Amino acid sequence: MQKSVLEYLEQTLMKHGNKTAVIDEHQSLNFEELACYSQKLGLMLAERVFKKPIAVLLPKSANSLIAFLGILYSGNFYVPIDVKSPSTRVRSILDDLGNPLVITNRELCQDYDEISKEQVVLIETVFEVEDKDEDNTLFYGFEELVDTDPVYPGFPRNYT
């Protein structure tokens, strides 16, 4: 029995690794590529935080899916933020989360002065990381996930 979406991804990867997983207007990724980039991001994040919220400030795309899965691989949980949100709302969400890491892209990073550079993880860096020889399918937080861990929490506050 699978306990997380990551186990579904791992099983699909073994059966259909070369099949298309996601397509957007900028890129197409098969399951092997999706898992590889997500795991790379997961390793980067797990070195910094564990079982914490991580904000995702990206448009709906293959990159946002990489971010969500990478966050889960790291043992953390994601909080998507609409890229069309006014900066006051973004600041309020980040404050409520305790100023978490924020995954975004280079373009959006320039638009949000309220996000400190120490908080930012640029999604583009995942494509720049060299492949390592070791198997990264089970690492850091992924091994410790249980089916009751949050993936995407709801917040009671009404952001305006």
Image (tube, rainbow, N blue to C red):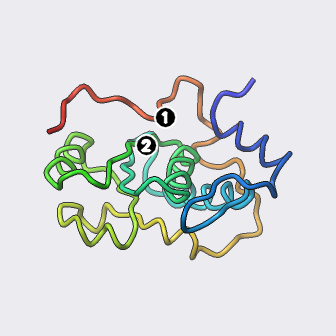
The single residue placed furthest to the front in the displayed view is: 25
Residue 20: image x %, image y %? 73, 55
Task: Give the label on residue 151, or none.
Answer: 1
Residue at the spot 38% in from the left edge and 62% down from the top edge: 104
Q: Amino acid at mark 1?
A: Val
Task: Give SS at disc 2.
Answer: strand
Q: Which residue is at a point 18% across and 37% down the rendered structure image? A: 159
Give the answer, above or below, for where 87 lies relative to 111.
above
Residue found at x 13% / y 51%:
88
Q: Amino acid at mark 2?
A: Tyr
Q: Which mark is residue 103?
A: none
Q: Nearer the viewer, residue 146 or 81?
A: 81
Quarter holding the C terminus is: top left
Q: Position of residue 156 (x, y in %)?
A: 25, 25
Please name whichever residue, 147 or 93, is drawn nearer the observer in this view of the structure: 93
Residue marked by disc 2: 78
| Residue 29 as seen in the image, left or right of residue 53 | right
